[in-house]
Image: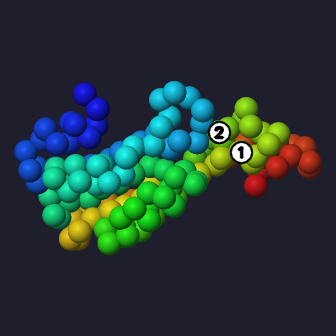
Amino acid sequence: MDGIAGLRSLPEHSVDMLLIDPPYGTTRNYWDVPLPLPELWEAVRWAVKPSGAVLFFAQCPYDKILGASNLPMLRYEWVWYKSRCTGFLNARRAPLKKTENILVFYQKLPLYNPQFEQGRPYKKNVSKSPWSFANT
C-alpha cells in the first residue's frame, strides 16, 4: 500500500502529527519520484486533525516546490545540521550536503511542549595540522 492510499484508509481527522520523508526526485533512481502533491495534500487534509502538524524532510529544490504547493498551511522551516556530510559521489560536481530542511505545516496551532534542555554539540574532530578545516 502506498502512503497516499494509507492516509485515505485512516479515519477522518485521526492523526495528530504526520512526519514524512518523501522521495525528493534529486537522483535517477527508479524509486526517487516525487509524490503527486495535489493528491498528497488531499489525503493529508483527510487524515490530519485541524490542530495537527505535518512535517516534511526535504532538500533543494524539492523543498521550494513542496512549500509553494501549500502556502496557506506552511508555517516555518527548520534546518537540520547533520554531523556528517553526504553526497560524496558528486563531490567533484557539487558541494557536499551538510543540512536538510524540515518544513512545518499546520492549519491551527498544534500542541507544543518545549523541553528547555541544553543540547550537546556534535563531536568535534581536532587536528594538529594548521591546514585542516576539521576544527571549523
Answer yes or no: is residue 63 visible.
yes
- Please, what secondary structure does the residue beneath circle 1 have? loop
In this picture, is 5 found above or below 66?
Answer: above
Is 32 in front, or is 21?
A: 32
Is 100 in front, or is 29?
A: 29
Which residue is rendered at x = 76% and y = 55% of the image?
Answer: 136
Answer yes or no: is residue 122 visible.
no
Which residue is rendered at x = 20% and y = 42% of the image?
Answer: 7
In this picture, is 23 found above or below 43?
Answer: above
Where does residue 68 sit, x and y in percent of width and height? 44, 65
Give the spatial CA distance, label 1 vs label 2. 6 Å
Q: What numbered label is drawn on residue 86? A: 2
Where does residue 108 sit, x and y in percent of width and height? 21, 71
- Horizontal side, residue 21 vs residue 28: left or right: left
Q: How would you rate the neighbour count of disc 2 (Cα within 10 Å): few for under 14, some for 14-19, many for 20 or more?
A: some
Where does residue 129 sit, x and y in percent of width and height? 90, 44
Is 98 in front, or is 65?
A: 65
The N terminus, quarter of image: top left
Q: Which amino acid does label 1 sit on?
A: Leu
Pointer 1 and pointer 2: residues touching (CB < 8 Å)?
A: yes
- Please, what secondary structure does the residue beneath circle 2 have? strand
Q: What residue type is labelled 2?
A: Thr
Determine the image quadrant of residue 92.
top right
Which residue is rendered at x = 35% and y = 64% of the image?
Answer: 70
- Horizontal side, residue 25 vs residue 8: left or right: right
Which residue is rendered at x = 92% and y = 49% of the image?
Answer: 130
Where does residue 89 sit, x and y in percent of width and height? 73, 32
Of the image marks 1 and 2, the number of the one nearer the N terminus: 2
Q: What numbered label is drawn on residue 96? A: 1
Q: How would you rate the neighbour count of disc 1 (Cα within 10 Å): few for under 14, some for 14-19, many for 20 or more?
A: some
Is 51 in front, or is 128?
A: 51
Q: What numbered label is drawn on residue 4? A: none
